[in-house]
Amino acid sequence: MTYSFKPFLLVLFCVFISCNVDEDANKNNEDNNFNTVNEVPEEPNDNTPLTATYTVEFIGEWTAESHPNMFPNDDHFSKTILLTHDANVTLFTEGELASTGIEDMSEIGDNDNLEVEMQTLISAGEANQYKIGPASIPGNGTDLLTVEATQNFSKLSYVAMIAPSPDWFSGVSSVSLFENGSWVNTVEIDVKAYDAGTENGNTFSYDNAETIPQQPITQISDAPLGDGTTVSPRLGYLKITLQE
């Protein structure tokens, strides 16, 4: 009787090839971190609200006792301005040129152009909400506003004119209200004194000559507000509190 081994050898060859293909495929999957099991990804377990409401209180500390050098008779801050926005924009940036809105606010306390600029940021999807206080406040006065932030617009900026002055303003840029996946409960931060770089003058006065060319925004360090290094004591601070 004659036996043929060809079919048997063919079967063995196919099994060998199949096993090697499967092993190579599994190895490739492991090398590329692929999961061969069809797992359904877990939904994020995040109960943090998408929006938050904050009260923002400005507490002024600018007095004849704290800053006696040439202290003006009609000391005040112009209307408080707040903006919640994303990380890509702000009301002003130290070292850059002031916008027309910041120029008008810092020189004469006029907020019309600044309001247009804030509305433009909101329309462009770069800011969420702005608030303007009802009136100017004394150097040692207070102001309280409420503003809404979202996780996408979780930065807060503040400005107000230091008056009377050529082009000085108090400001805070891009305070973070949302950190490490949670809303910040309370923030207290000193306001800084800035020169808008748009009008000459080093006294508490209006109607000075225009600065040509316009200069970048800088922190004030010289008299009459500064001591040659900084403005100390501070002019005031913001107390930012999350509302439950």
Image (cartoon, rainbow, N blue to C red):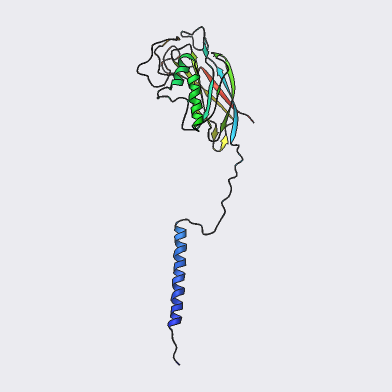
Q: Which of the two residues, 103 or 33, is positioned nearer the viewer here?
A: 103
> Which sits in the foreground, 112 or 36?
112
- Expressed as whole percent of the image width and height from the top left, the position of residue 124 reads 49, 32
Residue extending farthest bottom: 1
Q: The N terminus lies in which quarter of the figure? A: bottom left
User: From this viewpoint, is residue 119 visible?
Assistant: yes
Q: Residue 228 appears at what percent x and percent y?
A: 41, 15
Residue 180, located in which quarter of the rendered image?
Answer: top right
Residue 52 x %, y %: 59, 32
Determine the residue positioned at 44% across, 71% down. 17
Q: Please give the count of numbered marks on the rendered protein.
A: 0
Q: Residue at x 47, y 59 (%)?
A: 30
Asked if 223 appears above or below 3 in the picture, the reply is above
Whole-percent x, y for residue 46 in the image: 59, 42
Name the quarter where the C terminus is drawn. Answer: top right
| Residue drawn at point x = 46 percent, y = 17 percent | 104
- Name the residue at the right extreme: 244
- Residue 231 visible (yes or no): no
Placement of 113 over or under 180, stated as above or below: above
Hey, which quadrant is residue 204 in on the image? top left
Q: Is residue 182 above or below residue 239?
A: below
**Residue most extreme to the top:** 73
Q: Quadrant of residue 214?
A: top left
